[in-house]
Every structure is written in structure tokens, then in C-alpha cells.
Image: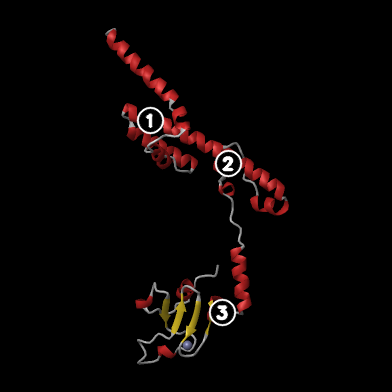
Amino acid sequence: MLPDIMPVAEQHGLVINERTRGKREVLAKCPFCQEDAKPGKEKKFYLSLNTEDQVFKCWFCGEAGGVFRFISLLEDVPESEVIERYRFKRGKYKPHPAERLTLHQLKLIDVNFKPHWAELRKYDKQLYFKVRQEVWERWKSFLFVERRSAFQQLYMAIETGTYSRFVANVKQREREIGVPLLEPVLDVFSREQWPTWVEEALELPREILKGGKEMCSNGLLFGI
Ligand SMILES: [Zn+2]
């Protein structure tokens, strides 16, 4: 994939013909010959940018090429350097989500230090993968328990009419653990069919609610 030519043009302050913006061929003032910057040529835009093929051509001076050449001319650096820069960018490492966990989050799963991910990756690939997997597995189970608990609370809150207190509690918990709970839980709740883990998670709350109702009715029965 080539870099898009339009953002490059914008970053370098090219004057775009607004009426062509968003089209396949966008016209701009040519920064190379600057012929269309001359008095009386306000309405001329000699540089054509092909936003599909990422190529350019000036209809006046004939300067033309691909997006790498475009960057190289605009920045006055050799094209090879531009290509190299882009290749480096493309190969840039994207950290695994496990590596983005904060120390605070790691402590929640009994990992009391933040691994030196970059060094591990560099010097001991095997250990790196092992640690990463262990951390990620723990985090996933942790999240599962958190969401299940939030779901149980939501269910209880709806049954007992304490929804706003539930929202306050769950938002507090979101801040503590640094991940969303309310949205995902409401999302599951609104599904037509609940997943098995939900049915299992609701066994206890249902039991408690049933017990509570029985106590109430017994209480009424005995006139306490
Ligand atoms: Zn030109």
C-alpha cells in the first residue's frame, strides 16, 4: 500500500482547488513551477493529483511521478530516502494489548511488575511470548469475572429498583480497573438471547431474590 497523496499535499500546504476535493482527480497549484501563482492565473490549477493511483502531474511544467517522488521533491530529499522512511514506518511494531496494560492493571491480576516488553521481545522471543500469553490469559479471566459480576449487579438492580445506584457503582469500578463495564453489560442484557454464562451467573441472584421475597411474605404472614 502506497501512502495517500492527498494528506501529503495538505501537510505541505499545497493550495487545493476546493471544487475538485474528494474527486478522483484533485487539482492544486503547482509548487514546482509556480506558474499558476502568477497574477491573472488565480483560477488556474496546473497540478493534477490522482488520488486513486497516488500519482501527480503538472500540466504546465511536466513535473510528474508517484507519491514517493512527490514527497522527495517537496522535501528536497532523495527518493530512496523517502522509500526507506516509509518502509520503516510500515514495519513499525504494534504492541500486543497485553503490553499496553498499566502496572495498576497488572497488579489486579497479581503481576506486580511491568515486564520490559521491548527488551524481552528483542533478547528472548520465547520468554516474551510465554509471559505475554500468561498475562493476557489472566487479564481475560479477570475481565470475564468483572463483567459477570457487573451483570449480576445489573440484574439485581433492575429487580429491586436500584438502577441508579448500580450505575454509580459500576462506573466507579470502571475507573478502578480502566476498562468499560457498563456498556458491554447493557449490550449483553439487551440481547434477545442471553449467552450461557449469563444464565449461570444469574442462578445466585435469582436464588437471593427468591429468598428475599419469601422472607417478605413470611414476615407479612406472621404480622412481624
Ligand atoms: Zn508545474
- Residue 58, given in percent of the width and then of the height, sits at 47, 86
- Residue 201, given in percent of the width and then of the height, sits at 46, 28
Badge number at residue 201: none
**Residue 224 shows in this picture:** no
Badge number at residue 155: 1
Report which residue position mark 3 lands on: 69
The answer to which quarter of the image holds residue 206 is top left
* Three-letter code for the amino acid on which mark 2 is drawn: Leu
Q: Residues within 10 Å of mark 1 (few under 14, many from 20)?
A: some
Q: Is residue 213 left or right of residue 12?
A: left
Q: Residues within 10 Å of mark 2 (few under 14, many from 20)?
A: many
Sequence-wise, the earlier of marks 2 and 3 is: 3
Q: Is residue 207 above or below residue 39?
A: above
Mark 2 or 3, closer to the camera: 3
- Residue 111, given in percent of the width and then of the height, sits at 61, 39
The answer to which quarter of the image holds residue 187 is top left
The front one of 174 and 151 is 151
Sequence-wise, the earlier of marks 1 and 3 is: 3
Report which residue position mark 2 lands on: 106
* Three-letter code for the amino acid on which mark 1 is drawn: Tyr
- Residue 40, given in percent of the width and then of the height, sits at 35, 92
Sequence-wise, the earlier of marks 1 and 2 is: 2
